[in-house]
Image: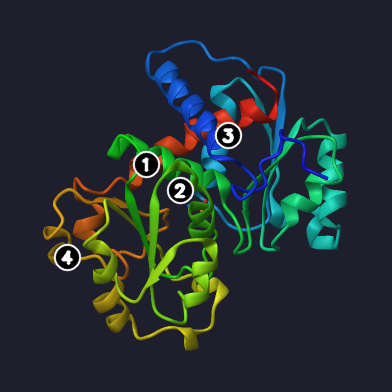
Amino acid sequence: MPLDSRHLVGLRELSGSEISAILDDAARLRDQVQSGGPLNELTGHIIALLFLEPSTRTKSSFTTAAYKLGAQVLPFDAKTSSTTKGESLLDTARTVVAAGADALVIRHKRVGSPHYLADRLQVPVINAGDGIDEHPTQGLLDALTLRDALGTLEGRTIAIVGDIRHSRVARSNCHALPKLGAKVLLAGPGTLCPPEMAALGVEVRPRIDDVLEEADAVMLLRIQRERIGGALLPSIAEYRRYYGLDMARLAKKPGLVVLHPAPMNRGVEVAHEVADSHQSHVFRQMENGVFVRMAVYRRALGVR
Ligand code: CP
């Protein structure tokens, strides 16, 4: 049975026009916030942020997005919650709904956790990252940032470089960007970007130089040390040489748009100077994250 369209469990499930509608609403909300217009559409709503994995950007921008729309955020700290006493995810979610939450945002290490809750709860569920599978609001904010920078995604080529295998960001982008008309190229060490990643409907090439030449934008990914053993990695020096974006590589592409979902490992996949260059859109991605999450809340809670 198809999921209720108030949920956002992944970009795999959305059409290009549904994704574009969220991006358009986010851009409209950005204009409204920047012109000082009143935004109180979610006054009286309570949103629970169930982050059972660490986060800085996603959690803080889901929080400010709620405040900017007039909603309240229900405090939840995994370390001091009853999950530490063995309470299940479903009972935890049911508890915050019983306490008055109108929508749930969930980050969890287990793939499919948001789908599991969405099938069982009456309130909208928003995926803030499930294991290695999807991070849909990151994919949306990446698409909005790329659209801002390139004018359109139609006919553009976007390279994603690094640890694709363990990246929910890469997966969400691979589901979304082709639906918006972009070509996606992947590159990374064979252990972290195996040929079977082409099953996502994108092209896989061996090294960063094999994708940069053709790319209008590049998204650099950090090595997800928390999800892998050291055996999958070349040395850091070798990684930097074949997959890192330094100023020498950037100098060959003066118009290249540089993205990174962050946190960045400066000096590994991205040089300090590149991260802070005018070609870097990393902090614009974070700003857009707030507007995208506002649009996702409006969709979830039926505000049109
Ligand atoms: N990009 C991202 O998801 O960052 P956080 O893990 O800090 O939320």
Please tell me whether mark 2 sits on a helix, a strand or a loop: helix
Identity of the residue drawn at 49% across and 74% down: 225
Above or below residue 301? Residue 76 is below
Residue at the disc numbered 3: 18
Looking at the picture, how far across and down is residue 4, in whole percent?
Answer: 77, 36
Residue under the point 83% across and 49% down: 92
| Local SS, label 3 | helix
Q: CA distance from mark 3 to mark 2?
A: 13 Å
Q: Earlier in the sequence, mark 4 or mark 3?
A: 3
In the rendered image, the vertical position of residue 38 relative to residue 235, given as above or below? above
Residue 207: give its label.
none
Q: Nearer the viewer, mark 4 or mark 3?
A: 3
User: Of the residues tagged 4 and 1, which is closer to the observer?
Assistant: 1
Q: Quadrant of the C terminus?
A: top right
Q: Which residue is mark 1?
A: 153
Task: Tell me what residue is drawn at x 45 percent, y 48 percent.
Answer: 177
Q: CA distance from mark 1 to mark 2?
A: 7 Å
Of the two numbered discs 4 and 1 on the same chain, state the one appearing first in sequence. Answer: 1
In the image, what residue type sits under mark 2?
Leu
Picture coordinates of residue 263 (x, y %)? 42, 57
Question: Disc 4 to disc 1, how far (Cα)?
Answer: 23 Å
Image-quadrant location for residue 41: top right
Q: Which residue is mark 4?
A: 249
Amino acid, disc 4 = Arg
Which residue is more in the foreground, 200 or 293?
200
How far, Cα to Cα, is label 3 from label 1?
15 Å
Q: Which amino acid lies under the numbered mark 1 shown in the image of this protein?
A: Leu
Q: Which residue is mark 2?
A: 177
Badge 4 or badge 2: first in the primary sequence: 2
Q: Tell me: residue 37, above or below residue 299.
A: above
Looking at the image, can residue 65 be seen? no
Give the mark, 3 or 2, whose residue is nearer the N terminus: 3
